[in-house]
Amino acid sequence: MMRLCDILCCVVLLLSGCGGGSSSDRSVTDLGRTDSLLHISAELKRIPGPGLDAVLVSCSLSMDGQPVLSEPEIQADRGSLGFLEAVAPGKWEVVLTPAGTGLHSITMRSGDVNKTVHPIVCEQLSDDWGQARLVEGLVNSQGYEDGAHISKDGEWLFVHYGPVYMSGILSHFGDIDHPLNTNAIGPYAAPLRPGFYDTRIVDGTIEHYSTLLPELGQMFLPPTMFYGFHRQADSSFAEPFPIGINDAEGASSNAFGICLVPGTDNPIVVFALEHYFDKDEYGVDLDTSHDIYSSPLTLGQVNELANWKRGTESSMEIIEDAKGMQVLNLPEQVLGQGNPMVSQNNAGTYALWTDAEYLPAGGADSWNNEQYFENISVHELSGDWATGSWSLSILPEPINGSDSHERQPFFTGTQLYFARDDATMPVTIMSSDYLGGPFEMSTSWSEPTVEISAGTGRFEAGSLLAVGEPTIATRTGGDEMYFIAVLSRGTIGNDDDLDLDGQVAMVPRLPIANE
C-alpha cells in the first residue's frame, strides 16, 4: 500500500513496445444475424520519443472469425489522433500524439459495439518496457485502488481498496465532516465490490466511528479492505472476492500490503497491520507499530482473515477469532514494517522484504516536515515458514539513500524493484541488479536506474502524478509489471483540491532482441 505518508510526500513534491490486446463482443442485430458476435480487439504499442512517447493503436474487427471491412470510428479524450490507416483486411492503425503525461482513453466503435482502452504515457520509461495501460476488467473504479500485488503466474491480482476520495485523506486528513471524507465515491457492493463491510456507509455517506467501540465517539476511519481478482481469457481481471478482518463489518482495520507467499502447498498471504486491539490488561497498546502478519487464503472465495468481536459492554473487551492469522516473529524495528513481499530462492529459502520507518539521526525530516525516513529491509528465514527464525538486514546504499525515501520492494531473484522519492523527485519506480553476495553489502547491488517516472509540474485532468507499488508476473509471453498510477482528475470542491485517483496499471516487458 502507498500509505498516507507515502502519498502525502508525493503530493508535496508534485505541488510507453508492444502490449497485449483487448477485446469487446456484442451480438450483431443490424446485420440481421442475432446469432453472431461483432468482435473488436485492440493492441497498444509504444513509439519512443523524442519527447513524450506516442502510442500506436491497432483496431481489428471480426465476426465469426472473419474480418469485418467496415471502417471503425476511433476517438480519444486527450491528445490528437493521426490518419486512420487500413493495414490489413479488418485491421486499422492510428497514432496518438499525447497531450501530456498520463491517461488517454481511446474508444473504438462500429455500429452499436464499442471498446475503450486506456494507455498511460509516462515522463520516463525504461527501454525494457512496452506501452503502459490501465488494467482492464473490474479492478479499477472511481474509488481508491492501491497496494497492487500480482501472483507470480499472473493469474491472481490483489488490491487494497476503499470507496473513498484519495484527496480527502490527503488534503483533509482527520476532518470527519469534510465532503471528500464523507461521500462514498466508489462502489461497495456487487458486481465490482461484493461483500464490502459497509456498516459505516449509510445512503452513500461514510460515518467515521468504530463499529466495535462506538462509545469512543467519532474518529477518522476511512473504510478499506483487500480484494482479489482472477485473470480472464482476454487478460482482463474479474470475479472479485473480498479479503478482510471482520470488525463488526466496519472495514476499519487498515491492513495493507497483501502479498502471496510462493512455494506453498496451500495459499498463504502476508500483509501489514497495526493491531489496534493488541492491548494489555490495562488497555495499553502492547505494540504501536505496524507488524507483518500471515494468514491462509482461499483463492476466489470470500476470506475473513479474522473476526474481532465485542466481549462485554462494560469492559469494552475485544475478543479475536484469528482464524489462522498470526504475527510473524520478526526482529523489532522502531516504527514497524510495511508493504511485505516474499521471495524464494532456488534452494527454497524464503526472504521477506519490507519497508520500515525510522527516525533520522538529525531528527525531523527537514525537506517535508515528516518525522521519519523510510528504507528497505530484508528478513531471511532459517527453518520452515511456520516455526523458523528471521534475521534482519537493512539494505545499504545504493538502495537506501541518506536523503530519500525507499519503499515497496519487489525482488525477482536477480533484480530489486522499489519506489523512491526525495525533495526533487515524486514517487518513482527504480530497479537495481542483484550482483550476488550478502544482501546487506553495497557490492551486492548495482546503482539504481529509473524504470517508470511520472515527471513533475502537470496537474490537469488525466496527468500522471506518481507511480509506485511495482509487482511482476512471469507469463508465457513475457513479464508484466503491475503498478499503481496516481492520476489527476482535475480539481474538486470549494477548496479546489487536486482530485487524485489511484489506479492499477500494467506494462509488458519487451522481448529481448534476437531472442
Image (cartoon, helix red, strand yellow):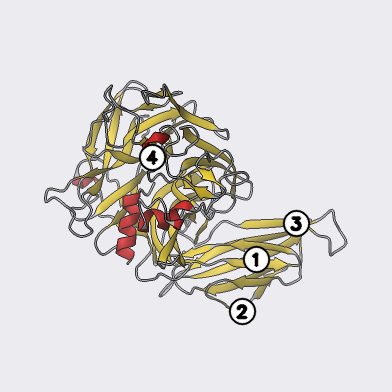
Circles 3 and 1: CB atoms closer than 8 Å: no
Callout 2 touching callout 3 (CB < 8 Å): no
Q: Amino acid at mark 1?
A: Cys
Q: 10 Å neighbourhood of mark 4: few (<14), some, or many (≥20)?
A: few
Residue 426 in sight here: no
Residue at 48% from the left image edge and 40% from the top image edge: 226
As measured in the structure, the alpha-carbon distance from the residue carrying label 3 to the one carrying label 4 is 51 Å
Circles 2 and 4, Cβ within 8 Å, touching? The answer is no
Is disc 3 placed on a helix, strand or loop?
strand
Position of 363 compared to 457: left or right? left
**Residue at the disc numbered 4:** 217
The residue under label 2 is: 83
- Compared to 396, does 106 lie above or below? below
Amino acid marked by disc 4: Gly
| Residue 179 pos. (x, y %) | 46, 57
Asked whether 310 or 112 is in front, the reply is: 310
Q: Earlier in the sequence, mark 3 or mark 1?
A: 3
The quarter of the picture where residue 499 lies is bottom left
The residues tagged by marks 3 and 1 sit, at their Cα atoms, a distance apart of 16 Å
Image height of 49 relative to 196, above or below = below
Q: Which mark is residue 26?
A: 3
Q: Which residue is labeled 1 in the image?
A: 59
Q: Residue at x 49, y 26 (%)?
A: 266
Secondary structure at badge 1 equals strand
